[in-house]
Amino acid sequence: MNQKLTIFSIKNSRWITGWMNQFCNSTMIKAANIRKTKGASVSWLLNVLLALPFCNVSIWEFTGSQAYRPCRDTFYRFLSNASYNWRRLLTSASGALIEQLDRLTGTSNDRVLIIDDSPYKRSRSKAVEYLGRQYDHSSGTYYRGFRLLGAGWSDGHSFVPVEVELLSNATADKRIGPDPDLDGRTHGGQRCKQATRKATEVALEMIERSQDADLPADYVVFDSWYGHAKLISQISEHLPVVCMVKNHPNYLYRYGKGIYTLQRLYQKVATRKRSRSEGPIIGSICAEMIGGVKVRVVFVRDKHNPDKWLALVSTDLDITPERICRIYAKRWAIEVFFKQIKQQLGLVGQLQARSYTACVAFASIVCLRYMMLCYYQRQQADGRTIPGLFYATCQQLESISLQCCLRIIVLEIMMILSRARSPQAFETACSICGVIEQFSKNVYNNSMTFKPLTNNCES
C-alpha cells in the first residue's frame, strides 16, 4: 500500500475539492440519487476516486489495514449500486461546466456536439458482465471488451464529455460474460437494457437528451461510421449535421434528374485539374441523399496524396465549404479525449470489477476527471480568465516603466533645445540623449521581470 496516500492528503487537495463544490456539489449528487446511510460519505469517496490517478494509486491498493482508510470493497459496493443515476450526475456536471465555458466563447465560434465510439478492451477478463467479442474497424481485429460510445461538447478550445455508454453485443452468443441480474426499474437495469441496442439508436437518444438539457450547440459532428442517410435525417430534425461520408456504391444521391454515386458526383465537381496552391478544397455541390435530406457535399483533397479525396456533407446549405471543414475539424477533440482517459486517467487497468454497473459508474468518474482537467486547462490557456486578466494588468503596468519615462524625458529635452536653433545646443542635446539611452539600456537589462499569476493546483 502506498503510505503517502492518506485521508488528510486527499482532503487537502483544494483544487479537486474546489472543482467539486462548483460543478459536482452535494445538490447534484443527491439529485442523482447517490447517497449512503453509513460509512464514508459519498462526497469523500468521489473525491478519492477523482484524485487516484494523480496520486498514482489504484482502487485495489486500499487494503483497509489502517483505521482512517476504507477497504477496496467500500469502493466496489459504491460503484456497483444499481440505484445510482450516474448519467444524471454526468449530465449535470457537464451542463454546469459548459455554461461556464460558453461565456468565454464568441458568437462567431461554432459550438458542436460530437458523437464517436472507441474500443474499451478488457483482454484479460472472462467473468465481467456483458463482456463481448467486439470488432475493431481501425485494426481489423477482434478484441474482448465493450464499445465506448461517447458524446461531447466542444467550442474548438475545450472538450467536455456529456454522456458515455458501454455497449455490448446484441446477440447473446457473442457475449462472453454473464448477463447481469438487475431489476429493470433501477437505473442500473435500464443501462443494461441499453447496452445491447444499436449504437445509432443510442447516439440519437444522446442528441435528444442534450437538447432537453438545453446545451448550447450549433451542429452535430461525427465520422463516416455514422454517416448514414437515415441517421443524418433523424439528427437533422434536432440540429444541423456536419459529417464525413463513405464512398460506397450503395450510398446514392439525387442531383437534378439523375441518381449518382459519390464517385460520380466527384467527377462532376472536379471538371478541371487543380494545383496544390489552390487549396485542399476541390469543390462542393448540393444534392439529396436517397432516403435522407438535402446536403451540401464538399470534396477535400488529401494533403499527403493529391489523387485521393474525402467527402464531407452538411445539412446546412447556407454555410461555405471552408466553414464546413472548420466545423468538422473540431471532431478531433473526442479522439484526444478517448486517448487521454485510457492512457492517463485510468479507464483501463485501474478498476478490477466484474459488475457491469461498476464499469459504467467508473467510466462516468473518469469523465469527471477529464472535465476537471479541462476546466483548469482553460483557465491557464484562455486570456479572458482570471490568470490571463492578471497578466494583462501586469503588462499594462509595465508600459509605464522607468525606461519609457527616460525616453519621454529625452524627447522633451530635444524639443526644448531645438527651439534655441544653435548648433552647439544641438550637439549638447545629442550627447545628453546618448548618455540617457545608455542608462536606460542598463536599467532594462537589470530590471525585474513580472511573472504572471497562474491558477495552479495549490494557488
Image (cartoon, helix red, strand yellow):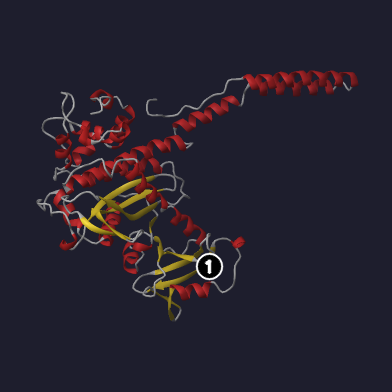
299 left or right of 35?
right
- Residue nearer the viewer, 221 or 428: 221
181 left or right of 140?
left
Residue sitting at 49 percent across and 66 percent down? 309
- Residue nearer the viewer, 229 or 4: 4
Q: Quadrant of residue 272?
A: bottom right
Q: Is residue 41 above or below residue 413?
A: below
Q: Indicate the position of residue 20 as horizontal and vertical percent values.
A: 29, 34
142 left or right of 438?
left
Query: Please, what is the three-letter code of the amino acid marked with disc 1?
Result: Asp
Residue sitting at 40 percent across and 49 percent down? 333
Q: Quadrant of the C terminus?
A: top left
Toward the bottom, the furthest residue is: 257
The residue pinned by badge 1 equals 307
Q: Is residue 197 above or below residue 12?
A: below
Specify whether residue 422 is in view.
Answer: no
Q: Quadrant of the N terminus?
A: top left
Q: Indicate the position of residue 365 as horizontal and vertical percent values.
A: 26, 41
Q: Quadrant of residue 295?
A: bottom left
Specify whether residue 341 is in view.
Answer: yes
Q: Indicate the position of residue 180 as horizontal and vertical percent values.
A: 12, 52
Q: Indicate the position of residue 381 as horizontal and vertical percent values.
A: 46, 37
- Residue nearer the viewer, 427 or 126: 126
Toward the front, the furthest residue is: 124
- Count of numbered circles on the image: 1
